[in-house]
Amino acid sequence: MKHLALIALAAASALTFSACDKNDEQKKPVETAAGFYVLNQGNASSGVPSTLTAFDYESGMGSGSNSCAFQNANNFQLGSNATDAMQYGSKLYIASYSSDVIWVADPVTLKVISQIQPGNELAGHNPRHFTAHKGKVYASMYTGYVAEIDTTLCAITREIKVGPNPEGLAVSRGKLYVGNSDGMNWTAGYTDNSISIIDLDKWTETQWQDHSKFFNVTKLISRGDDLFALSMGDYGAIKSSVKRIRDREVTDICEATTMAVSGNTLYTVNCVYGDVANSKFRAFDITSLQEVSNPFINQTSSADAKIDYTTAVGVDPITGDIVITSNYVDPATGWGLYSDPGYANIYDRNGNFKQRISTGVGPVEIVFVHSYK
């Protein structure tokens, strides 16, 4: 089964993914946009494995049949609870949390190059998220560590202890910032959450805890000297919001449950459980923090333009197309259909609806593909 019309393209050009919050060192695409992948987490409790959906702009493939792209390429599955995907250089990295493995694959063919599985000699297990800097890939490991991966050896070369249950991470001013969620302590209200700051030259870590400014940071995006942090709160009284961090100065931007940055624009979506019908899609200038669009998509009366339950947002840096992934919601109960396939809506740079494609179960991450000379 053909998963994406990129293999033929590869004969003529190299490919790079562009995940705007992942990689501050990649060569910027300068030619054409080819398509994107959607990482689907699956549903472990229902026995649904993780998958990878491939969408090719040229052929318009987007049916649910291509949501088995990784399995079709390798004749085995991604594993359970995949949480993140990132391309750096000529390799695609995929974190499979419950399976405790980092897949390293060719971003064109999806053929696995290497399987990084932490052994007993390492304390860091259960990979969650990635970032990259100066030839190294860094992975947050949910057991309370960050692993450094040598991209040539495809191996973990060192690890460092951080706070409990780290999630998103990003590099700013030569320091690696890591959001420690304390997620396994949810019954006590995530009280030990913090941000770890790692000096990459000295390989030392300090923790910054200030619950008056941020609480349960799960995603970090680096832009210039600034960090944009998704502070998820406690999923109750403390609301999820986006903050700007400059050194240790924290500025509130808006309430949100997910975000993306493209160019000079911060895109935020606030999709609150129990109130998804009133989701807000707001865009801000990252320099002034002034709102530039509300909403940044035009939701028409068309059923396909409607978004049920936003799980991720991404913006193609070449075309400006906006991709929003979502779970379906049972209209009778208002509950998300977490064991059913989701979908991705594609909008143009002006927010006009273009089309909907099917994804696998639990879409969580969008990775764009471009060709360049």
Image (tube, grey):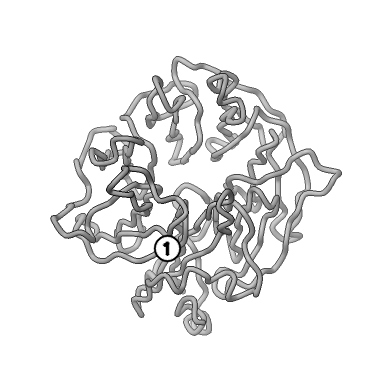
- Write down the quadrant of residue 188 in the picture: top right
Q: Give left or right: position of 304 versus 329.
A: left
Residue 77 horizontal/vertical position (percent) = 63, 66
Please name the residue that numbered disc 1 is placed on.
359
- Write down the quadrant of residue 111 in the picture: bottom right
Residue 162 horizontal/vertical position (percent) = 68, 30
- The amino acid on which the numbered mark 1 sits, given as a three-letter code, is Thr
Residue situated furthest front in the rendering? 332
Secondary structure category for the residue under label 1? strand
Q: In the rendered image of this protein, does residue 355 appear above or below residue 6?
A: above
Residue 257 horizontal/vertical position (percent) = 38, 37
Q: Give left or right: position of 105 versus 319.
A: right
Residue at 51% in and 27% down: 216
Q: In the rendered image of this protein, does residue 182 appear above or below residue 337?
A: above
Residue at 35% in and 55% down: 315
Q: Give left or right: position of 115 versus 362.
A: right
Residue 348 horizontal/vertical position (percent) = 24, 61
Q: Give left or right: position of 58 versus 217.
A: left
156 or 263: nearer the viewer:
156
Density class for disc 1 (Cα within 10 Å; few <14, some 14-19, many ≥20) is many
Query: Does the image show residue 350?
Result: yes
Residue situated furthest right in the rendering? 121
Residue at 64% in and 58% down: 79
Residue at 43% in and 34% down: 230
